[in-house]
């Protein structure tokens, strides 16, 4: 796969500051810190009035593209994809069979001084090249300049060029007494790495014991594999076909970071495509192209994304080398000039169905209805993306700096994802204008999401609508009372035009359709 080159800027500075996006999300009601009045809870987020609308719009567009109107296949016929909503808690044997109980873990180190825990493979050790001074532990993903701060405090005046960086797992544990931990003030406080399982544990029933232990699902995929036979037996699907699911998943991330990019509770949009083993390669290529096209359809520019094949040392246990997992990556402000994962398209082979067949005793073979002798366990192609990560991506892509408008920016949402498609604004809250605005609002609200905003200075209301990404503002003024015309303001250009109030619905429907 070829990679697109970065196109947002010519240097290493992103055009948008992530702090501005986070502030906008709080100020305008897109995303809040969960339990904020109690100081929050790291890795958990709440979606506010506009955030939930944005998230639901993206969710519904994915569901429509996958299930309601699935893509047209290579043979010119629509694909067969059905939906599912499986339980968050499954029989714990599920996660033994899938490999999550035994292998879904990260190497962790603890700091005896600060009582903090770190992923060992996310820490670099800065060792003085001359052998003099302490060894400093710093994050590999150092987007806050921590390395420079640590060097200034403990590096005896040396520049970063005087140190050599080594990943912590490659450091001999006998040398740990020389290392000052990432937040420590003295050396020798880090423990040896230990494996830490990322699944949240819970208990089912009145007693808490090993027999009643269960897990919150770390992915939605296994619920699909568990129901593979149920779908075959109850639906009129044939190989090749897909099962799609949107739902919450939970991972006890040690270091949630970058806003909602990596959190402990998140939503996934996953589809498992079951196909004949001989056809897996061509279906993988099909879904790579199809998924990139879908991201572009909701407003993500092609030049903001790259396609990256997983290296050999990244491959999952189920992936086939050479045609395993490819990531669609996006150029986030916090990864700039690099990219971060947006969606993975994986060839999971027959690993999951085979594992569940062996552990449950249930036959997972597909029997060709036209040839009973043709029996096989299907291979699976999995396009898997995060819904919550999709929200962040759309926000980052839409955030447009514009010093020529009062808000200083606007959100350039595609209308299909915009929380509000239009806003109705009476110029003043008197002289019959609010009543006329309300009448127009009632006429439009059955056909599209519209905002009725009556109070405050009109300029401030325009600024608010720019900040929440509303494509059109419709102003009711004194002329409206005389000639029944309104002013329509275009978000991106700020241009205005007058049209008859009885043509507003037709006009918006046409304009929004052209911008789809």
Image: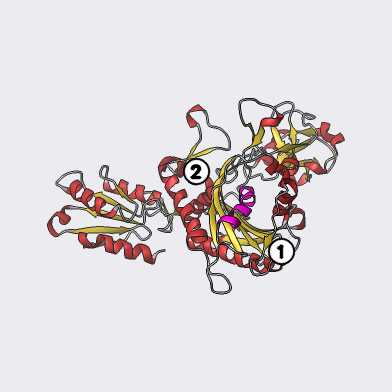
* Rendering quarter of residue 289: bottom right
Which residue does the numbered mark 1 point to in the structure image?
375
Q: Residue at x 36, y 61 (%)?
A: 493
Most extreme residue toward the right, as rendered? 174
Which residue does the numbered mark 2 point to in the structure image?
22
Q: Secondary structure at mark 1?
A: strand
Q: Is residue 467 above or below residue 237?
A: above
Could you say where residue 506 lies in the image, as x and y percent from the top left?
27, 63
Could you say where residue 248 lies in the image, as x and y percent from the top left?
55, 44
1, 93: nearer the viewer: 93
Most extreme residue toward the bottom, as rendered? 75
Q: Is residue 226 magenta?
A: yes
**One can see residue 240 in this view:** yes
Q: Is residue 463 above or below residue 201?
A: below
Relative to 377, 504 lies left or right: left
Q: Is residue 372 above or below residue 432?
A: below
Could you say where residue 127 lies in the image, as x and y percent from the top left?
80, 41
Magenta stretch? Answer: 221-234
Most extreme residue toward the left, as rendered? 482
């Amino acid at each position: 796969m070829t990679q697109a080159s970065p196109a947002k800027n010519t240097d290493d500075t992103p055009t948008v500051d992530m702090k501005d996006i986070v502030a906008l999300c709080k100020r305008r009601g897109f995303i809040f810190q969960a339990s904020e009045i109690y100081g929050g809870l790291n890795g958990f987020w709440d979606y506010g009035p506009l955030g939930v609308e944005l998230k639901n719009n993206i969710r519904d567009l994915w569901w429509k593209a996958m299930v309601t109107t699935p893509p047209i296949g290579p043979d010119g016929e629509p694909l067969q994809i059905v939906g599912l909503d499986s339980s968050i808690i499954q029989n714990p044997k599920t996660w033994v069979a899938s490999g999550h109980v035994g292998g879904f873990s990260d190497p962790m180190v603890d700091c005896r001084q600060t009582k903090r825990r770190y992923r060992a493979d996310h820490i670099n050790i800065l060792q003085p090249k001359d052998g003099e001074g302490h060894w400093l532990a710093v994050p590999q993903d150092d987007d806050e300049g921590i390395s420079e701060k640590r060097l200034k405090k403990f590096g005896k005046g040396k520049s970063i060029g005087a140190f050599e960086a080594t990943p912590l797992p490659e450091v001999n544990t006998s040398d740990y007494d020389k290392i000052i931990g990432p937040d420590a003030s003295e050396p020798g406080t880090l423990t040896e790495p230990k494996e830490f399982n990322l699944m949240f544990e819970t208990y089912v029933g009145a007693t808490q014991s090993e027999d009643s232990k269960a897990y919150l699902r770390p992915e939605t995929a296994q619920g699909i594999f568990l129901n593979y036979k149920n779908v075959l037996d109850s639906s009129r699907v044939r190989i090749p076909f897909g099962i799609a699911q949107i739902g919450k998943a939970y991972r006890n991330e040690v270091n949630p970071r970058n806003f909602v990019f990596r959190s402990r509770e998140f939503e996934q949009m996953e589809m498992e495509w079951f196909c004949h083993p001989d056809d897996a390669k061509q279906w993988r290529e099909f879904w790579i192209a199809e998924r990139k096209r879908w991201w572009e359809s909701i407003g993500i520019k092609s030049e903001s994304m790259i396609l990256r094949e997983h290296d050999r040392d990244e491959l999952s246990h189920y992936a086939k080398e050479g045609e395993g997992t490819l990531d669609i990556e996006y150029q986030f402000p916090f990864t700039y000039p690099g990219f971060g994962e947006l969606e993975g398209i994986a060839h999971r082979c027959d690993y999951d169905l085979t594992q569940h067949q062996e552990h449950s005793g249930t036959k997972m073979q597909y029997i060709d209805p036209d040839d009973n002798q043709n029996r096989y366990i299907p291979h699976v192609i999995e396009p898997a993306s995060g819904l919550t990560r999709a929200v962040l991506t759309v926000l980052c892509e839409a955030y447009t700096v514009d010093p020529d408008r009062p808000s200083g920016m606007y959100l350039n949402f595609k209308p299909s994802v915009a929380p509000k498609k239009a806003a109705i604004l009476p110029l003043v809250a008197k002289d019959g204008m609010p009543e006329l605005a309300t009448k127009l609002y009632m006429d439009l609200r059955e056909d599209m999401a519209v905002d009725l905003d009556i109070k405050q200075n009109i300029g401030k209301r325009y600024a608010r609508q720019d900040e929440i990404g509303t494509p059109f503002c419709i102003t009711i003024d004194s002329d409206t009372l005389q000639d029944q015309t309104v002013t329509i303001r275009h978000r991106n250009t700020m241009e205005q035009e007058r049209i008859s109030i009885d043509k507003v619905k037709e006009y918006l429907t046409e304009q929004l359709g052209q911008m789809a």
